[in-house]
Image (spheres, grey):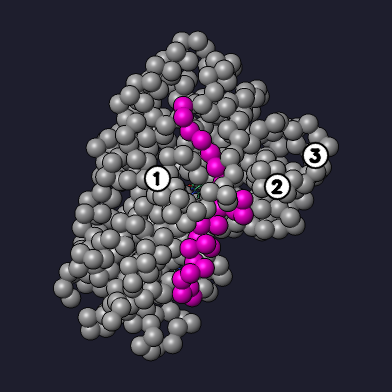
Amino acid sequence: MARRTAVIGAGPAGCYAAHLLQQQGREVVLYEQAKSVGGRTTSWHDQGWVVDSGAGFFTNFYPTLWGLITKLGLESEITNLSRSNALTDGEKVADFTLGSTASFANFTFLGTRAKLSMAMQTALIFAKYRHLDLSSAASLAPFDDASVRDDAVKRVGERAYQYLVRPGIEPFWFFSCESISRSLMLALQAKAATARFYTFRQGMNFVCTRLAAHLDVRTGITVDQIKPSGAKFKITGATLADGPEHTYDEVIVATTGSVAAKITAGLDERIVPDTVRSFLKSQTYVPNTHLVFVIDKGVKLPKMSCLLPCGPKDHRVAGLNFNSHKLQTRGEARSGQEAISVYLTAEESKATLDMSERDLYTHAWRLARELSPDLPLRAEPLQMIQRREAIPIHAVGRYRAAAEVGKQQKGPLVFAGDYLSTATVDGAMRTGYEAAHALDQRVAI
Ligand SMILES: Cc1cc2nc3c(=O)[nH]c(=O)nc-3n(C[C@H](O)[C@H](O)[C@H](O)COP(=O)(O)OP(=O)(O)OC[C@H]3O[C@@H](n4cnc5c(N)ncnc54)[C@H](O)[C@@H]3O)c2cc1C
């Protein structure tokens, strides 16, 4: 008889794990608290716009995702994204196209010496670290011994750190380079010159919706507890009936670390070893607020895909994303309008968590105009999301600890999620892959 497996959480980690397990012949049920699958890759489809609420792109160095794209023949669903960004210190704006030597040579925030030092370091890092897999904690663990800030300042100096390294990391992950592992920067810098960016025509949740289309998914169900039931597990939740239907041989928990710790609190040390439990409990996240506004394009707008702050000042906006460049590649260009995503920094997101929706829209648009004064006075609010747990903090030592947890994971209950890897779609999927394989190494209960 097929083993019955429950997967909790239908983000990229859970959807991919459920897909793999079903392919292996298991009877899989995927529980998701939201109304739809996708987790932090969920996209909004509103008034003809397709805007990603969380993850907005993937790269050429996402091996697990590319494996799936090839396996499922999804190439025609992909579209290239522009690499032209601009950086601003609040006064001047400089174009910065990733991978373009000309753009780097003309980058006005750095002098010739700083550019030479940055170019040499990038070449050295490429030579030494190009084998690093951003999605694999085991690959990154050996270099997880210092913060991005300490390592970068030593390698390229304070100015290049403030004007290139910080804007290359903080607007995408919202955490501070001062507290996170240099492994992340080494893996990114080694790939920077050859990086390519892509998205899915139908939005970044396309992968999850595609995988879920062939799965038994129960949406709108919040799992409260996973309880032992003989040699099996019972899934409980306010909206779940108490019956054999929700009893399983195995479970993959693919939520954030804090939720994973909470819903497995009643399981003993044989199922969740103490080291794994303390790792789950130690995971902390930065919040993020993302607001989308529609404006008429009557104003002069920079020709770029995003505008990112740079320099040593504290920033309140993590970045502005101009969404029409995505729409154009998706073949649905809306003339005369632009949808602008405003991402607040972690500190600003935290400070405004209790603000009313209306005040938050007004406040965020004012901050966006401080960063880019050419934006018009008025903008029409389109969508907004506040995530209290947006990105797990990649603290120094966390990749090493995650790699150890990876080795200890054994069925019948294992964990998946980006907190065990790097917070990317590929990182999350990689943990889904590892969790699905770890289920086969079972401990007796
Ligand atoms: C603003 C933002 C921008 C980002 N940009 C990018 C990007 O451009 N590129 C990139 O690769 N990555 C990006 N990321 C990161 C990426 O989205 C995440 O790393 C990835 O989605 C994590 O996948 P996951 O499956 O681990 O978790 P999630 O996507 O969070 O999925 C977990 C799922 O579990 C569900 N769940 C939680 N608790 C329960 C419960 N008790 N019962 C049932 N279900 C539950 C949740 O509703 C959720 O659907 C971004 C993230 C954010 C927030």
Left or right, 158 with respect to 34, comes to left
Quarter of the figure that contains the C terminus: bottom left
Q: Which residue is mark 3?
A: 297
Task: For marks 3 and 1, give the one nearer the viewer.
Answer: 1
Q: Which residue is mark 1?
A: 63
Quick check: can you spot residue 277?
no
Task: For marks 2 and 3, give the one nearer the viewer.
Answer: 2
User: Residue 56 at what x, y percent from top left?
Assistant: 56, 47
Instruction: Give 105 or 87, whichever is nearer the viewer.
Output: 105
User: Residue 98 at what x, y percent from top left?
Assistant: 53, 28
Quick check: can you spot residue 47?
yes
Find out whether the residues at labels 2 and 3 contact each other: C-beta distance under 8 Å.
no
* Residue that extends furthest to the right in the rendered view of this protein: 298
Element at label 2: loop
Q: Amino acid at mark 2?
A: Gly
Crowdedness near tag 2: few (<14), some (14–19) or many (≥20) residues, C-alpha within 10 Å: few
Element at label 1: helix
Crowdedness near tag 1: few (<14), some (14–19) or many (≥20) residues, C-alpha within 10 Å: some
In the image, residue 57 above or below residue 232: above
* Residue that extends furthest to the bottom in the rendered view of this protein: 243
Q: What whole-number distance in Å separates the C-alpha atoms at marks 2 and 3?
A: 19 Å
Q: Which residue is mark 2?
A: 331
Where is residue 89, by image quadrant?
top right
Give the mark nearer the N terminus: 3 vs 1.
1
**Point 39% across, 29% down: residue:** 190
User: Residue 165 at what x, y percent from top left?
Assistant: 46, 29
Left or right, 300 with respect to 232, comes to right
Q: Amino acid at mark 3?
A: Lys
Q: Which residues are magenta?
A: 193-218
Quarter of the figure that contains the N terminus: bottom left
**Point 33% across, 73% down: residue:** 26
Q: What whole-number distance in Å separates the C-alpha atoms at marks 1 and 2?
A: 27 Å
